[in-house]
Amino acid sequence: MTRSPEKDSAGTSENPGVQQNATASGTARVYQAGRDLRVLSIRIPRALRNTFIALVVLAVLGGGTWAVVHWVLPSYAPTYKTQFLMDAAAVTDSADAAAVAASLGTVVGNAGDADALALRRFGGECGTDGNTAQLVDFGTDNRQDIVRAARQAPVGGKATLLRGIVQAVDDFSGRLAFGAGQRAKQVNRIVVVTRHGKDACDDDTGFVRREIADRIRAAGLAIEFRLIGYQVPDDQNETLKSIATAGSNPAEPVFADTPSDLDAALEWSTNTEPVLRNATKIVDVLNPAVTRINTAVQEIGEGRLKEAGQNLDRAREPHVGTEFEDLGGRTKTPEARDIGDRASRLREQQRTVLDAADRLLEAARSKASLGARHEAFEKAATDYNTQVDAMNKALAALRAKAPAAR
């Protein structure tokens, strides 16, 4: 029986529901000369012929460009696109701004290899062009640029939070086919690190939220927000929570009071959440395949070999290449390496289970004895379930480290 994992608001499972259903049913019964060619020649004027050739070349080039834009470039698109939006408004203690910069430096160093990162700041005078600026454009090889820009960003002015978020959204909407403007394969997101819970230039929180949502719709793609409030005054917490609902797949803001809290919140939002999301997607895709394998083994025992073969063929269909590729690029922390290794072993063991079921079906078709091959399937299924248990525990332990929303 298959159990579906319950989803939390961030798209991950509260109880990762890796189905342990590869084990064969306890009630299943096991039975067992050339021709001349005449060529027609037509004379075409040279000018017409040249025009025709030019049109053909243009058509080929146009088709090639379409193929590049729609097939080739997407394969090189980043898995995640993350824009960090840093609060650079005036503060009474310069150590606060330094803590944000230091935390960003640690986080970008742990980012996935296929993550395209960018950095924008907000802070300045209301109604002026300079109250927000992108300091580093999207790229997968710009980590040190982000670290330097975060440390050197000037601090001053008012908290122009709305303007910063709106412009950060606009950064995703241009040049969608090429270069830094490519859409992410999985997630586009803005990670906001703010020391202010409301915009200094507009007290209407509802307007702020609607304006952000309108810009996201205009951009034509889903953008997630992860808001981290660092030493935000308590009376501004609710305002920040309201702003957080403007993005897709909303999540409660995390409020950090100390530099270590800030480090944990940023690391979770930037790097840990993608690991959990990828692992959960992999499990969710592998589970139905395991169900089909289990059904096929029951059908073999009942002598319905055609149906068993169809189910085994469908069990080969799941594709989670992007998720495995992304996990492979997130090896900067022990937790990420552990989850990635477990996911790979789980997929390999599932292939072993499928191979064992194939051999069982082959024996049934040839009317050979099924005993030994059924035992091999049982062993492979038991090993798979053992790895499922281990993955469940690892995901639960990692999820338990999530910073609690205030």
Image (cartoon, rainbow, N blue to C red):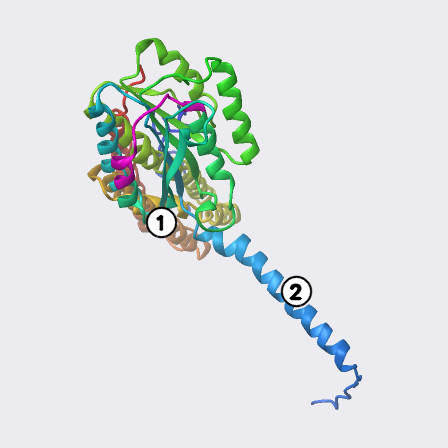
Residue 29 in view, yes or no: no
Q: Position of residue 185 (x, y in %)?
A: 45, 44
- State the residue position of label 2: 59
128 over 344 or under it: above or below:
above
Residue 169 coordinates in the image, percent (x, y): 47, 33
SS category of the residue bearing label 2: helix
Residue at 37% over, 26% down: 123
Closer to the camera, 176 or 377? 176
CB contact under 8 Å: marks 1 and 2: no
The quarter of the picture where residue 24 lies is top left
Is 390 inside the magenta-drawn segment?
Answer: no
Q: Residue at x 71, y 77 (%)?
A: 50
- Asked if residue 39 is positioned above or below residue 384 in the image, the reply reads below
Q: Earlier in the sequence, mark 1 or mark 2?
A: 2
Q: Exactly how many numbered labels are in the figure?
A: 2
The picture quadrant where one finds residue 108 is top left
The secondary structure type at the circle numbered 1 is helix
Q: Amino acid at mark 1?
A: Arg
Q: Amino acid at mark 2?
A: Ala
Provide the residue designation for mark 1. 351
Image quarter where the N terminus lies is: top left
Q: Is residue 360 above or below residue 23?
A: below
Q: Could you give the CA–CA distance between mark 1 and mark 2, rounded to whole angstroms?
A: 45 Å
Q: Position of residue 228 (x, y in %)?
A: 32, 24
**Can residue 67 be seen in the rendering of this structure?**
yes
Residue situated in front as seen by the camera: 197 or 109: 197
Mark 1 against mark 2, which lies toward the viewer? Answer: 2
Q: Identify the magenta region.
A: 147-162
Question: For this rendering, which residue is in front, 38 or 402?
Answer: 402
Q: Quadrant of residue 52?
A: bottom right
